[in-house]
Image (cartoon, helix red, strand yellow):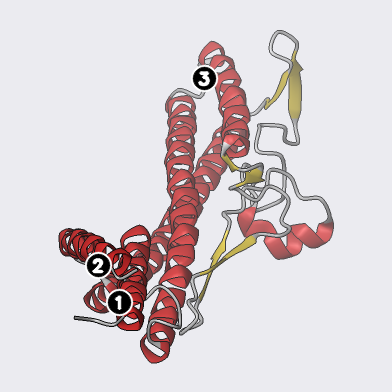
Amino acid sequence: MFSVTSDKQSIDNLVKKRAALQKQLISGRKYVDPSDDPTIFAELQGYYSQMNSIRKTLDNIKEALHILSLTESGLELLKQINRSTADLFTQISDNVLDENGFYSNMKLINSYEEEFFNTAKTFKHKNLLLFDTTGNNAVLEWDLSTNLAKQMIYWIRPKIIQKPSSSTLINTDMKYIYFFRTADMSKYYLQFANTELVSSSGMYAAKDKDVLYDDIVKNRAVLDEDYYKLIDNVRDTGITVQKIKIRREILLKTLANLENTTNSINAIDVDQIKYEINAIDAQLKIARDTYACSF
């Protein structure tokens, strides 16, 4: 028969073992704090730190892909407006002597220009314009690093500049200015030399129909140049998307490996722990009854 001291020690050991199992059951982990095993606990904390870092980076990636997806949608709309505008110039040039057709189409071109820039300004993310309309602060960057590797992704917002703000801008950023003729910087619309005002439309047009035709052709060429700019923006945005997606796949695989590693070390068998707790409860009852009878 056990002594009173050994009975008390047995009860204490069972209580400690039960508490340890209960702690595992609540936390869902085998190693809950350093006292369980300092070496293994430290190793696991390193893994968990990596996993948390990766999850934060994946959140950054999710936001980046959302922004770029919105931008791609905006670029597609701008391309459509551009082509619709170009088609109107084609209609005008096909019958330059049709004054009624000319002015009605020019009114539509006016509305398309307004739609073009209004569309660019509607694409936002958290009040950030996704199209740069000022020529400033065009670069966005996302930190796709983890605590093991540094990686930044940079992306230049597409520039959709309607008017040059200075001669410097004209000289340096002309390639970003839409609806301006590259030859002489004249306004996109037909406001040229040798013009007359048509009061019913409020527009100017060349008296000489040959001059008018040449101007129409020039403006159609500008629209084509603008279209190629938009295509370049689509390409550059797509390249950035692919870089980010590649990074995401790498991080997802790394995260999965870390989760498998930590689970193999720290996972618990819930049913087994519950079984052991029940078994300890039964032992405790017997031990306590025995301890009580010893007095």
Q: Is disc 1 in contact with disc 2, using a CB cutoff of under 8 Å?
A: yes
Q: Secondary structure at mark 2?
A: helix
Tag 1 residue: 7
Q: Secondary structure at mark 3?
A: loop
Identify residue type, mark 3: Leu
* Foreground residue among 232 and 87: 232
Name the residue: 20% across, 66% down.
283
Residue labelled with disc 3: 97
Q: Callout 1: 10 Å neighbours few (<14), some, many (20+)?
A: some
Residue topped by disc 2 = 290
Marks 3/1: CA distance? Answer: 113 Å
| Amino acid type assigned to the residue bearing label 1 in the image | Asp
| Residue 163, percent from left and from top | 74, 45
- Of badges 3 and 1, nearer the viewer stands 1
Circle 3: is it few (<14), some (14-19), or many (20+) Cα within 10 Å? some
Asked whether disc 3 touches disc 1, contact meaning CB atoms under 8 Å apart, the reply is no
Kindly indicate whether the residue at mark 2 contacts the one at mark 3 (C-beta within 8 angstroms): no
Q: Secondary structure at mark 1?
A: helix
Q: Residue furthest bottom?
A: 39
Seen in the image, is 294 located left or right of residue 183?
left
- Tell me the residue at 49%/56% (across/down): 64
Gap in angstroms between the C-alphas marked 1 and 2: 8 Å
For the N terminus, the quadrant is bottom left
Q: Residue at x 23, y 62 (%)?
A: 277
Left or right: residue 279 versus residue 89 is: left
